[in-house]
Amino acid sequence: MLPRETLATAEVPDGETLTLISHGRDFIIMLGRDELMGTRMQFSEEQLAVLTLAELDTRKPRVLIGGYGMGFTYRAALENLPEGGSVTVAEIVPEILEWAEGPLAHLTGDCLSDPRGEVVICDVAALIDDANDGTTAKYDAILLDVDNGPDGIVRDANFRIYSKTGLGKARDALGPGGILAVWSAAPDHKFTMRLKESGFDVEVREVRARPNNKGPRHTIWFARKRSA
């Protein structure tokens, strides 16, 4: 049996410890004893970007991603981004980018130098607030994968994002017909209802963790902002 090797650790602001682990050819990011993500099961995180972009009617979409992680969603967004589009990632843990340029460099490739995208070290809620305040332009899509679902597992402050107040802010940060897409390891009927009550038309899809239709079933909510 292959041993697990700890490569690095990082503290989540006001949260727990993240640990980067290698297991043979695979890499895993742990939150305490919980597995947040790994290279063996990345398909659903890629589909978070692929399926959202396929639903957008905007010619030059402006996309915001909450959480860089291992970059699965970010790279998929860049690969499927229409000409003239842009992607911004909000990542709250600076060490995540050090890992991306260090032990995970073979995954990262040149995505961090892609002129169509940028990674900002901040809370994704702050960028959503900026769009509400008129500091920045509205987004066409907001993709959230900052926890293992619509709760504050990584840090308590994240609970705000999934509350009616937080969802209302995300809705108002979107342009007409914009989409809020949220990744989760499991379904959550109450969250579906909360999205609908917050002014979204909601579609819930199950996506396998692996592209061969194997692995766990993950949930993605595609919440489109209702027309005024």
Image (cartoon, rainbow, N blue to C red):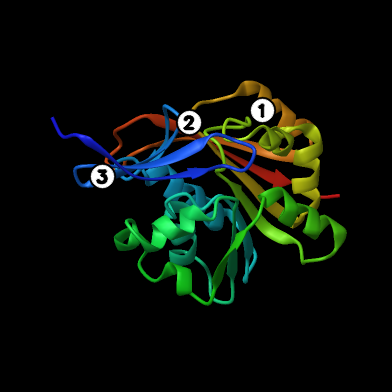
Residue 23 percent coordinates (x, y): 23, 40
> Which disc is residue 36 wearing?
none
Q: Amino acid at mark 1?
A: Phe
Label 1: element kind: helix
| Label located before the other in sequence (2 or 3) | 3
From the viewer's perspective, tell me whether residue 212 is left or right of residue 148.
Answer: left
From the viewer's perspective, tell me whether residue 213 is left or right of residue 176.
Answer: left
Circle 1 Cα neighbour tier, 10 Å, few/some/many (<14 / 14–19 / ≥20): some
How many numbered marks does the figure carry?
A: 3
Q: CA distance from mark 1 to mark 3?
A: 32 Å
Q: CA distance from mark 2 to mark 3?
A: 20 Å
Q: Residue at x 39, y 63 (%)?
A: 101
Residue 168 percent coordinates (x, y): 80, 42
Report if residue 107 is visible in the image: yes
Circle 2 Cα neighbour tier, 10 Å, few/some/many (<14 / 14–19 / ≥20): some
Compare residues 152 and 176 and report the one nearer the observer. 152
Residue that carries the numbered disc 1 in the rendered image: 191
Residue that carries the numbered disc 2 in the rendered image: 185
Q: Residue at x 59, y 24 (%)?
A: 188
Residue that carries the numbered disc 3 in the rendered image: 26
Residue 179 percent coordinates (x, y): 66, 50
Label 2: element kind: loop
Mark 1 or mark 3, whichever is nearer to me:
3
Q: Quadrant of the N terminus?
A: top left
From the viewer's perspective, tell me whether residue 34 is left or right of residue 92.
Answer: left
Q: CA distance from mark 2 to mark 1?
A: 13 Å
